[in-house]
Image (cartoon, rainbow, N blue to C red):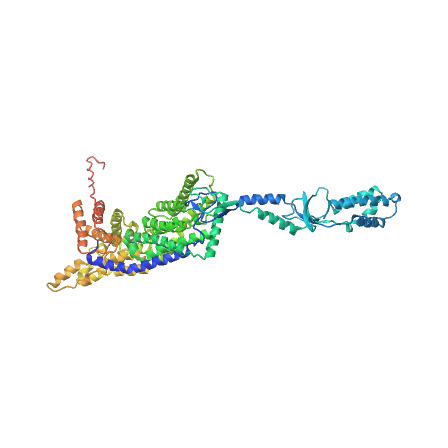
Amino acid sequence: MKSKFSGKISSLYRRHQLPIYITLALLTLAAVVWFYPHPTVSHYKYEQGRPWNYAQLIAPFDVPIRPDSATMAARIDSIDEAFVPVYTRIEVNADSMARVIRKRINEANVPLELDDLSYEPDSLFRHLIKLLNAAYDAGMLTDSLPVSAATQNRGEIRYYRAERGKDGKQQAILVKQSTAGMMTCAQLIARIDSLAQRYNGLRRAKSAGLEAVVRPNLFCDVTESERLLENERALQSLDMGMIQRGQTIINKGTIITAQDYTNLRTYEKMLQEQRDKTRRNDILITLGQALYVALLLMAFMYYVHSFARKEVYDSIRAVVYLLALIMLFFVAVVMSDRFITNGGIYLVPLPLLAVLVLIFFDARLALMTSFTCVMLCGGLASFPLEYIAIQFTGISAAVYSVGNLERRSQLFRASLFVGLTYWITYVTLQLMHNGSFEDFSWYAVGILALSAILTSLAYVMMLPVERLFGFVSDFTLIELTDVNTPLIHALSEECPGTFQHSVSVGTLATDAARAVGADVLLVRAGAMYHDIGKMSNPIFFTENQHGVNPHDGLTPERSAQIITGHVPEGLRRADKAGLPEQIKKFISEHHGRGMAKYFYITACRQAGDAYVDPEPYTYIGPNPQSVETSILMMADSVEAASRSLKEHTPQAITELVDKIIDGQIADGLHNESTLSYRDVPVIKAAFVKRLRTMYHSRIAYPEAPARKNAPK
């Protein structure tokens, strides 16, 4: 309800706000784009086993088809299992070794016994040569065999053998040999001991120190084996074909197989290499991101300007708070997505953002703010539509479950609602996309559950936000209306009439606020504190007087100063008690720039034709700036005037309400308020209904007749 003059002032004020808000929006835009990922290859986000959600991808150049990781792993496992290690073979002269062994046996320092008389060294020597020739021809291995990835297969070995080629030149040929007939040094010595036993020379052989003579002629070449193995492994990664330019890499909706995933990775790698060669920059990508963010912020600011409550747009602190919340949660999502690779983007609870807006404003603004942030974060998700669906249903559940916040337990109930909604949406999307639960992940369910639990952090974050931005939550308002708070308790003790008047005003005001959709808790708290300034001079106010009127001995101007002075005195007490700014507005605006008309009219009568300056009889104001303070002004005047009615009939009450409210409107006291004309009849009806209840007539109880024969 604005006059033409006040409308011009408001328009001028808004024009001064506009540059500030544009600057804030630009700063938010720059910050969001700064934190936005800047892909150097493509904007595609995909996962193996999930559908390809983008348009058909056509190869702009030839893309080789390389084995996928599973195929590669299977091939490499097969290569490793079948790989034959490489050994180095050294030629050994078996005859010379046999002579050395015979000499050592003959010279062995063993006491002669009966068995030694039949010792046959020549026969032992002949058989020893045969044994050594056979052993070294087959190959002698070391006692401790090396263990490595290249020497696991023990069925065969390979070694290089020099052969003459067709050109007559010597060349090393890698030949393969079974390990079935091979022995180790320990096995050969055992065979020699067994042979010596046949010729009664066992004790001589065991004391001959054969370990120093018998040596292997095959040594594992680990380096060469590893080299050959790596070469064979590398051969398995050769291209299996080619996706030629113009052919389809993948179609929209196709489930991404392991091979598709490898093809997409190959495509992105080649695209990156081409960009690196041509030094192509990402200006267009960044420009697209900036335009996307700008459109979302423009839509959000337009909503705040046109559809949010007036006090939200008019408060720079409120706009800064909303933009800061969007920015804070966006950065949190970016960091989670960056450092928690599997589902980190879902960990940040965006329903918490909605609750932090709902606590201080309303549900519509909470939904719009959250939706803006969800759309910003959707650009980070691998599956944007899935992410947006899950987050927005969770946000809606949080807003619905919190509703009119009156108990802190509602925040924990909101976490439960959000969690259930998350899970239902996740299961629904699984069925819609896949038609089964094959890709159902308990890990994803756990991430969503943790996100829902984090929604209850609103309980912890409320107080810092209130202190930092000067907001008032519903919890604080409920605490302020408690009659046991020090200031309200003092009011009830020192000014019982004013306290009762405040309670009655609060009853009227809350009924009207509920009827027009205003903030009921704020109106109730404002009503409890609007007259605390009367505690300085309680006896000068009618509701606290009992027969004696102290104004009879004062001049009208002095009386008016005392009466109007309860407003600045109330503000002083509010500052001392640390009351929020929103409550102080009710103290300063509940009379607006109205006058103490009784004393002004009295002064005019006493002055006769002389001019009486109305300023000493006028309250300091300002006039009501919101629907809530306008309702309180009306309720305050109506409740006080209703006490002077001689008859509280419905007609008398209706006429009183119409007279007072119409008079305030005529005096222009509500011109600066956001109150609309269509709200006025609703408020009047609420006042009339409540006053009729407060002053309803009671049935007169008849007196009991006297009993004639009553016992004496």
Of 102 and 159, nearer the camera is: 159
Of 471 and 77, nearer the camera is: 77
Quarter of the image for the C terminus: give it: top left
Return the residue found at the far left. Answer: 609
The image position of residue 158, as x and y in percent, is: 68, 46
Q: Is residue 169 left or right of residue 687?
A: right
The image position of residue 583, as x and y in percent, is: 29, 56
Q: Is residue 399 left or right of residue 446?
A: left
Q: Residue at x 85, y 49 (%)?
A: 106
Residue 710 occupies quadrant: top left
Residue 445 vs 673, above or below: the answer is above
Residue 107 vs 620, above or below: the answer is above
Q: Residue at x 65, y 51 (%)?
A: 224
Q: Residue at x 22, y 49 (%)?
A: 679
- Does the rendering let one see residue 645? no
Of 418 and 537, nearer the camera is: 418
The image position of residue 277, as x and y in percent, is: 47, 56
Return the residue found at the far top. Answer: 709
Number of on-image labels: 0
Return the residue found at the far bottom. Answer: 610
The image position of residue 143, as x and y in percent, is: 72, 48
- Does the rendering let one see residue 666? yes
